[in-house]
Image: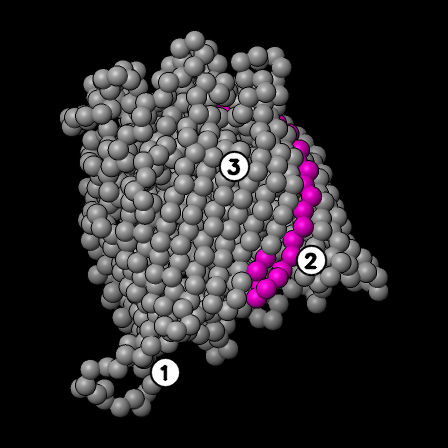
Amino acid sequence: MQPSLRENLSVIPVATVCILLAFWTRHADAQTPNQAEPSKKLPAVTVTGERVGSYKSDTVQVGTFRDMAPIDVPQTSNVITREVLDAQATTSLFGALRNTAGVTRSQLNGSTYDNIAIRGILVENRSNYRLNGSLPVINLIDIPMENKERVEVLKGASSLYYGFVPPSGIVNMVTKRASKDPILNVSVMANIYGGANTHIDAGRRFGSEQQFGARINLLAGREDIGIHNFSGHRALMSGAFDWRVNDKLSLKFDVEHYRKEVSEQAAIQAPAAVNGVITLPPVPNARRNLAGEWQKYDAEATNLLLRADYAISDNWGLLFELGKAQTRRDRNFSQFQNYDLSTGEGTLRTFFNRGQRWDNENIRAEVFGRLPGQFITHEVSLGFTGNERSQDPRTSSTFDTTQNLFNPVDIARRSPTVPFGPNRSKITDWGLYVSDRILIGGRLQAMLGVRSSFYESVGATTHYKAENINPSLSLMYKPVDNVSIYASYIEGVEESGQAPANRANNGEILAPAVSKQKEVGVKAIVAQGILLQVAYFDIKRASTTVDASNRFVLNGMAQYSGFELAASGEITKNLSLIASALFMEAKQLNRGNAETFGKIPDNTPERTASVFAEYRLPFIPGLALGSGVYYVGRRPVNTANQAFVDDYVILSLSARYATRIAGKRTMFQAVVDNATNSNYWSTAGNGLLGVGAPVMVKTVARVEF
């Protein structure tokens, strides 16, 4: 019999402590072999104002812009650095991405995992999330942030490097790696509802020439987010290893395994339209859960990525990457539907899913280099990518029971009543690409790229093939070193989406389509190193809707155009800032569908804004105070715009205090999210509504050994 998740988790903290204590003891002995016996006195407490890290990143790793400075990237990009993640005590993907413009939840409220849209376009869960710029990880379980150094978002079309992906953007997560200084951090986080976890982060280099590096992250804890009928656990084990074999060859290997088993909060279906208008219910109490505690979301994921870099010469190199991502899931998903707005009486429908599985296998080979010249220099990349994505979501049985929106009752435990049949499908996506970054006279830059792609999707009832050639072009001018002006045109290809579980064609992959993006922008670095970005974008891509037969289908084209602004970095040596705003117009363009023509795509806000600032008090060394405000504009609940969820504003507050105890860097922190305890609709899309999380107070203590 397989051990339960609870049994597995109970072993992790003990094993973690034993391994890390042995690791640290060996390191301490090596560093202080002649250390005298410690004093019997209490250790002194020293207050310092030490700080490392920045709110601005010096490089991006995503796509063909690998290791470029953000100011040189001719496309909107945002980076959430480790310093920002730490300042906000963020452990979730949405918690990181809410610092970038246009990011919203979609369909689900985030109690299990983060289903995300950018600029109203869904970030596809099997292709748009990348590990270290390469491996497409499967975002169907909360992706831990504890082992990530930063999160990058490349907005818009990205098919040149990533193949068939929607033009919402690429979310790239960069893992922590060993640096020249050994590290051993132990953190404990707890919240007011009883949730708590322990996290250990250890890294160091080995070998006579420090040629080996290892960074280990281990976490285990209890989950509680403040809603009724909720319990669960979360765990992470990850390792990032590197080996400089010689002056020409280096290897990197990443492995991460994470699990989450929690009660899933019920989604709320939008009511049916009456005379073309949907009347929404009042926003329920944020702590209410219409599902039972036993209705669990139990998932685990394993990601493996191997990379080899070989220097052919001073100007040319080879890159080879091989990776695999796998996610397994059992789920008891429920949605509340067919309810009376006056009494709250309705039906809770529960979908049983068992043995669901998703696999991504990815390979990349690339040769890249420089062709230097006196006036013109070429930086060329020629590569091949192959990606195979298979899934078996397993058709589910359902059961209905009565429930009340305003006065929920306990739901008696039930079990599946019919066998689970397979629902397998497979996507093959491979391509050849070439890009040339042309540097002209030190001030002008042109980037030319083209990709030839082959795509095949084979499902139970569908079979699509497509071959596309997609160009990419950009121009950038730098009048001075800290200012860049650019314009770009990019064509992308995408899968157009997959029918969700509550539609008649559940699991069907829609036909691939071409998207086109134009963008012009300005970037500048000012003050103590703050990066400012202003861009105008125009995206046209395939639109989707739900037809009269409850089928998820294509619906012509949609256009998304507007301005995006961002700022990140240090305004002064004591004040850091990350801020963004989106002002957009979005509309559907299918004249053949009068119900949706000219309407806003569902779950698309035309205004969003966020700002988080932290001030380090000069008169109290070590103390930093922070505050964040996050605004999301109103959004339509469906493509016919028959109702809108209201806009909302969320306030967060934080304080962290850094000191030294017994010579060890120590940090104490308190964070309050949704400080006003607002009730609001946090998500829409696919006919579903989700309620935002209640006020959350969490504390963190971290010691650096």
C-alpha gap between disc 3 and disc 1: 54 Å
Residue 250 image position (x, y, % from top left) = 56, 64
The quadrant holding residue 340 is top left
Query: Can residue 108 be seen here?
Result: no
Residue 551 versus residue 208 in the image, above or below: above
Between discs 3 and 1, the one toward the N terminus? 1
Q: Which residue occupies the foreground of this view, 687 or 644?
A: 644
| Secondary structure of the residue carrying numbered label 1 | helix
Residue 703 versus residue 288 in the image, above or below: below
- Residue holding disc 3: 607
Q: Which residue is at 67% across, 41% downward?
A: 519
What mark, if any, has residue 483 been given in the picture?
2
Mark nearer the viewer, 3 or 1:
3
Q: Which residue is at 31% across, 79% downward?
A: 46
Residue 133 image position (x, y, % from top left) = 54, 51
Between discs 2 and 1, the one toward the N terminus? 1
